[in-house]
Image: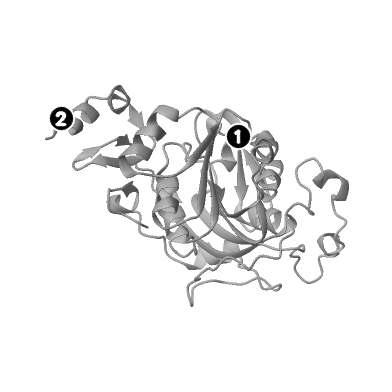
Amino acid sequence: MTSAATELQDHPALAHPWYYSIELAPGIWTRGAEHANVAATRALLARTQVEGARCLDIGAQEGLVTALLCRRGASEVVAYDRADRSERLDLVREAMGLQAEYVQGTPLSGLRARLREMGRDPFDVVIFSGVLYHMFDPLGGLADVRALVRNGGLVIVETSAVVSAEPSMHFNTAGRFFGWSTYWQVSLECLDYMLRFLRLEPIDCVFVPSTAASPDAPQLVRVAVTCRAVDRFVPDPGDRWMASERAGEADYAEHLDWEEVTSTAPAVGYQAPPKGLVRRPGGSVDLFQTVRGSTPVDATPERVKLSLDMRE
């Protein structure tokens, strides 16, 4: 082992558990939790045209997704986390030679203003993985994310969700779903509707199984959804409320300005699978029906770790 590798192995940050398992030098790995949901996010990211895109990784933790975006040729990558993971992310950036900017310490509700101060326009690709169920206000949080992607861009949303066709949200009463910092579990149908209500059209969907803390809690999955940011609401036929394009008109202004996300740039490329997706009457992917009728993505260890040579 080289002196540099020995020094890295003895770094204080590697003595503690990490969110991600990342190889920082040959044979030297962080102590990641290896959450299966990482595989769902990566499966959709692999289908996304990242090369040349301006990308934002929300809830970056130590930067596994950030690293993948850089390695696949994104023209610009910004990693964001509310908590300060600077020491760990610096190790990853140095080990892998990543050119990524880091924003931390700002609540998600203030990220739009912070990025504007930095001269950043809405991004081409936004990753929003493992965050939604930690929020007091899931709809407001999704609206804040929508403000950060231009029309024609893509958002990958990954979250824990209840397997139900009922448009509902379930509170984490007495920790029946998960432990600390977890509040709402949206149903698949509720997530589907909220995305379309925010002009995010689901175009792909994968999942991995999940288990709640209490056996009496509703069935959960970790679902990842690729959404196309569009310039219109995406109602089902007969949904006059959403189709009116006036629903919540004044309230949107608290979270986003539709004019700011207007764009004439080409749509970001995406390679959806040729089969396995169930569509709603309006044409978007039906999250509940697709999850119910498909098999989980591969969440074996190599799909939740990041080695030095991985690009997807």
Name the amino acid, label 1: Tyr
Residue 275: % across, % down: 49, 76
Residue 269: % across, % down: 54, 68
Dividing the picture into quarters, in which one does residue 267 lie? bottom right
Q: Which residue is mark 1?
A: 183
Dividing the picture into quarters, in which one does residue 239 lie? bottom right
Residue 224: % across, % down: 51, 55
Q: Along the polypeptide, which appears first: circle 2 or circle 1?
A: 2
Q: What residue is at 75 percent from the left and 63 percent from the top?
A: 231
Q: Secondary structure at mark 1?
A: loop
Determine whether label 2 and label 1 are within 8 Å by CB: no
Q: What residue is at 49 percent from the left and 73 percent from the top?
A: 276
Task: Say which mark, if any, is on residue 282.
Answer: none
Closer to the camera in the image, 187 or 131: 131
Task: Say which mark, if any, is on residue 3.
Answer: 2
The residues bearing labels 2 and 1 have C-alpha atoms spaced at a distance of 46 Å
